[in-house]
Amino acid sequence: MTIYLHVWRQAKAGVPGRMVRYEVKDVSHHMSFLELLDVLNEELTNKGEDPIAFDHDCREGICGMCGFMVNGVAHGPMPRTTLCQLHMRHFKDDADLYLEPWRARAFSVIRDLVVDRGALDRIIAAGGFVSVPTGSAPDGNAIPVPKGNAERAMDAAACIGCGACEAACPIPKGHSKPGGGRKRLPLSQLCASKYLTILPGWLYDRGMGSVKPIRSGSSEPVAMHAHAMDHLRYIRETMEGAASFTAVPGFGGIAMGATALFAALVAAGQPTLDRWLAVWVVEGFLALVIGVFAMARKARSVNVSLFSRPGQKFALGLSPPMLAAALLTVVLYRQNQVALLPGIWLLLYGVGVMAAGTFSVKVVPAMGFCFMLLGAAALLSPAGWGNWLLAAGFGGLQTLFGIIIARRYGG
Amino acid sequence: MGGLWVDYRLMSTIPGLFIIGEANFSDHGANRLGASALMQGLADGYFITPYTVGDYLGSTKLEKVSSDHPACHEATNKVTGMTRRLLAAKGKRTVDSFHRELGKLLWENCGMARNAKDIEHALAKIPELREEYWRDVNVLGTNEEFNQCLERAGRVADFFELAELICLDALARDESCGCHLREEHQTPDGEALRDDANFCHTAVWEYQSGRRPERHTEPLQFTNVLPAQRSYK
């Protein structure tokens, strides 16, 4: 068969490149794509022309060294196949193929189809750390790893670090596509760094007690070009954003619910409205403390920073309605409108949970919605029902959803 | 096939030089095939070196080394000289064509089954081909750029030396042992014929600049399990 190759030729970084057309005759169906280039390079060398530079190593599909775009697709048209394992039998005779280096700004061209993938290496390195003194390896069976984490880590460990995901990512960045939609990255992509954050740090911390990392996971070893840095931060944030914020505590919710039920009973027995209000205000602070403590604890156990971007979004969604509720409590108390408070509390808590829950697992916004319904019911019903609607909401709903979250999402 | 000595941490006799995967002897001895070689690489890389290399780096005070050491100068000069020579040859044949010819020579004369006559033929041919290589190789480009052609040329230059050593070793081992068969040494029904009287030793070759490498042996002693002819029957 005959293949027409249009290859990106660029002598070095920073000089203009161009597509050059080559005709390769007598191509065997059994050749791999890299062998096709070997044949072409041999011809070019014999003619005294510079051979095409391209990366390759094992040629068995496992090392992650080779890779470029074939007709705009990273590693060519076969799914889950690197270029070295892509054979010419998958192409038609007289095919026109366009070969370009990885399309990604973080990977600058070194020559022709060879790019500098140091940025990806640094992401991978930033995910892992080494602890000293290490002592002997911990007993793997003594460290419980949640099945989900183990599965994700295994999936991610299959990453060969070739960089194709970065070149293939549909999020408009290095190569802006008009109208390119914003899509979430599958976790299996750019996953090497993910796997390093899922397992080893977790294992080391649990297995070795009070060891200190030589270099913390977040420190960047090498100063990078500002642009690449920006780009990597974007990838990292996208990855984090794609993973739902799971630090919402289930058992924390159950504990908050239990204290609220108790508060409702205590509040019902108070002789004056002032003392009734005082009980609920104390319960509010108590629930806040329980909530923050439970979130921090859960975030630590699943190895997510409470102050990561999803964590920040959660706090940003929840706090404005909470502050509004606090202000309204003061205002309505001074206006002797305490009877309105149960409805307002339930409604605003629902609003906050719904807004914050947009970035969390789906059950959280559902819980917010239920609180809003209950709040509306409280505002429209007789004042005497207020205390028991509070019990139903902060006690009942909170406990119910706490159980659901604890059972489905753990902890 | 591996066999380099390592300690429990997979470190060689040179402090800080770790040998992992197929190159060491740790779990399988000097000889392993197929999946056990792969498994050794995975086990060393995933479970052992993350602890032992980290331990070494964390517990060792590493002194600053300068590139002013005479050995460093010597190595740099040698590589620079070789690079200049390769680029100056400006011959007619590509690096790949030499690589292929050398590979074919080895495959046909020093393969799984080999005999003294063929090996001697290869040993006569390799120096000729090497001489032709340095005279007639065509390396494009310059030393001052990213040059894969030059990279490959240096590697193939090393392969001549390695190919010659493989043949020398094959010739010296005048018995059938391991996974190679010396055609002169086989039983009437084609099984490998060992010669433990003369070859019960391990051997290493010492590089001699410009001369034939020198062979050193160390006797092997078996007391409990004795070497025996392999049988698949």
Image (cartoon, rainbow, N blue to C red):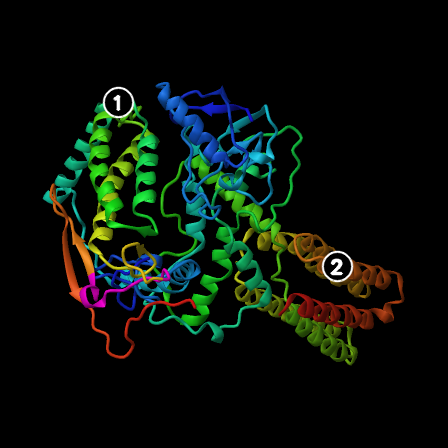
Judge whether residue A336 can be spotted in this image. no
Look at the picture and state if A254 lies above or below B94.
below
Question: Quick one: SS at disc 1?
Answer: loop
Horizontal arrangement in the rendering, residue B203 relative to residue A31 (left or right) = left
Front position among marks 2 and 1: 1
Judge whether residue A193 can be spotted in this image. yes
Question: Quick one: SS at disc 2?
Answer: helix
Is B193 in the magenta?
yes
Query: Which quadrant of the structure image shows residue A385?
Result: bottom right
| Chain letter of the residue beneath label 2 in the structure image | A
For the image shown, how many numbered marks are present on the structure? Answer: 2
Callouts 2 and 1 close, C-beta under 8 Å: no
Horizontal arrangement in the rendering, residue A60 relative to residue A334 (left or right) = left
Look at the picture and state if B38 lies above or below A123.
below
| Chain letter of the residue beneath label 1 in the structure image | B
* Residue A79 place in picture, x, y as percent: 60, 43
Magenta span of residues: B189-202
Q: Disc 2 marks which residue?
A: A368
At label 2, the amino acid type is: Gly
Q: Nearer the viewer, residue A210 or A381?
A: A210
Q: Residues within 10 Å of mark 2 (few under 14, many from 20)?
A: many
Q: Could you tell me which residue is drawn at 67 percent across and 69 percent down?
A: A406
Q: Could you tell me which residue is drawn at 35 percent across and 64 percent down?
A: B51
Which label is found at residue B91? 1
Q: Could you tell me which residue is drawn at 72 percent across and 57 percent down?
A: A362
Query: Which quadrant of the structure image shows residue A348?
Result: bottom right
- Disc 2 with disc 1 on a shared chain: no
Spatial distance from mark 2 to mark 1, Cα to Cα? Answer: 78 Å
At label 1, the amino acid type is: Gly
